[in-house]
Amino acid sequence: MLLLKLLMGKTIDVARDRAFDQTKTVMPTEMSRGVYMRNAPSLAALKLMHLMIGTAGGRMADPVRHEIRLSDIRRIDGMDNHSRASLTPLFEELRAVTIREGNPEVDADRVVIGGLLDHAVLDRKDPVSGDTLLSWYFGRSFIEMAERSNHWAILDRQTVFHLGSKYSVLLFQHIASLVNLDHVAAKTFTVPELRAVLGIPEGKLERFSNFNQRVIQPAVAEINQLSRLTLTATPRKVGRTVANVEIAWTVKDDPTPAKRELTASKVGRKARRKGSAEAVAAEFPETGGIAYSPRWRDLKRAAGCNMDDSLIAANFRRFLKERGISRDAANIEKLFSNYCAKVGKV
């Protein structure tokens, strides 16, 4: 037992110690920095991967079956309303992820290739509870990596679950693994290194201007909006060619705006991120009433209307449909105010 303890790294101990904290996930640095990644999974599969590692916690290096119920996943804010059918291809993606330790072009002695996932089982609904049980075994390569790991990233789960791009998740988990290193507040990546970290395949976004515009800057902006970190990405040129990119970070003194954004509606989040929410037309709810929509409820009251919130919402949607007007028309708020004023008190 003592020998086993000596062979195991500190990451597992940290994961065990933080098992009580359901807001954080402890991930081995080797995983969070993404250097393992081949066949990078989609955003939804990445979120599932984080959930699986967080659920396993201090047992992630144990060769045992881990499990979670579908109903538990559905209760997680930021995760999709999954079904067994929607989760099946995500587990297939994770089964295809390859872990590679060592660079065959540099390390002539040892290169290890393995997988993240051994196998997973998505059981049918329990005849009594009606729930679906999801279970999995991690692959041997992941287990050995977790056993040896002495460095870790502590990731805010809600930030990961709310990020809207796989590039944002991959960059966030990588930088999170560096944040607590002493005297380190920036890292310089060669362009090929950063492409590898973000899972950009060869032949895609080869021009740096496209890579920067479509991947780097949007990921940095989203992380800055939704996390406790503030990132900056600065390209560095050699001659006229961008040779590397410096990613610098600071921890926010006040993370309140980010926490507030995590609880806010996703609608308009991109506009708020760009600082132009006021310039973007509102969108009237597609279904339901407006009792819990302050914007529309306040407009209704200001117009002197006291019709039931659900009824006026249904009537206004019918009004829009009859006239072929979109719910996100540029003047939708004015249309709703005028409609409420015409209805008046009932």
Image (cartoon, rainbow, N blue to C red):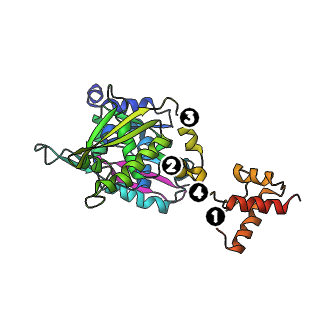
Q: Amino acid at mark 4?
A: Gly
Mark 1 is surrounded, within 10 Å at the Cα level, by few (under 14), some (14 to 19) or many (20 or more) other residues, namely some
* Distance in Å between CA atoms under marks 4 and 1: 42 Å
> Mark 1 against mark 3, which lies toward the viewer?
1
Residue at numbered disc 3: 256
Q: Secondary structure at mark 4?
A: loop
Report which residue position mark 2 lands on. 274
* Circles 4 and 1: CB atoms closer than 8 Å: no
The secondary structure type at the circle numbered 3 is helix
Q: CA distance from mark 2 to mark 4?
A: 43 Å
According to the picture, the residue beneath numbered tag 4 turns out to be 130
Alpha carbons under labels 1 and 3: distance apart: 32 Å
How far apart are the alpha carbons under marks 3 and 4? Answer: 39 Å
Residue 221 position in % (x across, y down): 44, 45
Of labels 2 and 1, earlier in sequence is 2
- The image quarter containing residue 58 is top left
Select label 3 or label 4 by which is in front.
3
62 sits left or right of 316 in the view: left
User: Residues in magenta?
Assistant: 116-140
* Rendered position, 343 above or below 253: below
Q: Is residue 37 magenta?
A: no
Along the polypeptide, which appears first: circle 2 or circle 4? Answer: 4
Specify the amino acid type for callout 3.
Thr
Seen at 72% across and 74% down, the residue is: 322
